[in-house]
Image: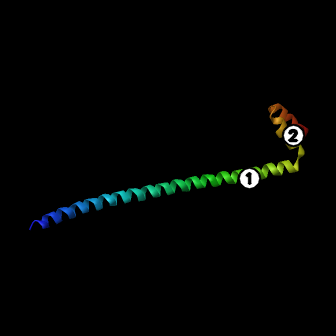
Amino acid sequence: MKPLPATGDALNVIEQHIVAINGYLDAIATSAREQSAGLAEINTAVNRMHQTTQRNAATVKEVSVSSPASVRVVRVAGGGCAAAAQSWEEF
């Protein structure tokens, strides 16, 4: 009755493979959770940057509509801080 020991050996090999596969699946699940957490952090950062950009755009629009002199300040600012300060004083 040799087939029984061979069957037992085969079942042991199958068990070892199942244990190994289970370990791989655990590693994949852990990596997926870590990746999800990382993506959530990136999403939060991008949303904050978007909100800040929208606030900045609204502020620029508000300033440019309310004061034509502010446009001169922006244009003159390329020439240096003193020129920008002078332009603000004119305003």
For label 2, the crowd category at 10 Å Cα-Cα, with few meaning under 14, some 14 to 19 and many 20 or more, is some
Disc 1 and disc 2 in contact, CB within 8 angstroms: no
Residue under the image location 56 percent in, 54 percent down: 41
| Residue 3: x %, y % from top left | 13, 66
Q: Position of residue 79 (x, y in %)?
A: 82, 31
Crowd tier of the residue under label 1, counting other residues whose Cα lies within 10 Å: few below 14, some 14–19, many 20 or above: few
Give the vertical position of 72 relative to 40 (above or below).
above
- Left/right placement of residue 90 relative to residue 1 reads right
Give the mark nearest the N terminus, 1 or 2.
1
**Quarter that holds the C terminus:** top right
Q: Identify the residue at image location x=61%, y=52%.
A: 45
Provide the secondary structure element on which disc 1 rests: helix
- As rendered, which of 31 and 56 lies closer to the eye? 31
Report the residue at 89% width, 45% height from top. 68
| CA distance separating discs 1 and 2 | 22 Å
* Residue closer to the observer: 5 or 73: 5
Amino acid bearing label 1: Arg
Which scheme is used to colour this image of the protein? rainbow
Report the residue at 25% width, 62% height from top. 14
Q: Please, what is the three-letter code of the amino acid marked with disc 2?
A: Arg
Q: Is residue 59 above or below residue 26?
A: above
Q: Is residue 48 left or right of residue 90?
A: left
Q: Secondary structure at mark 2?
A: helix
Q: Nearer the viewer, residue 43 or 91?
A: 43
Q: From the image, which quarter does the N terminus lie in?
A: bottom left
Q: Which residue is mark 1?
A: 55
Where is residue 54 shown, x and y percent of the image?
73, 53
Q: Residue furthest left?
A: 1
Residue marked by disc 2: 72
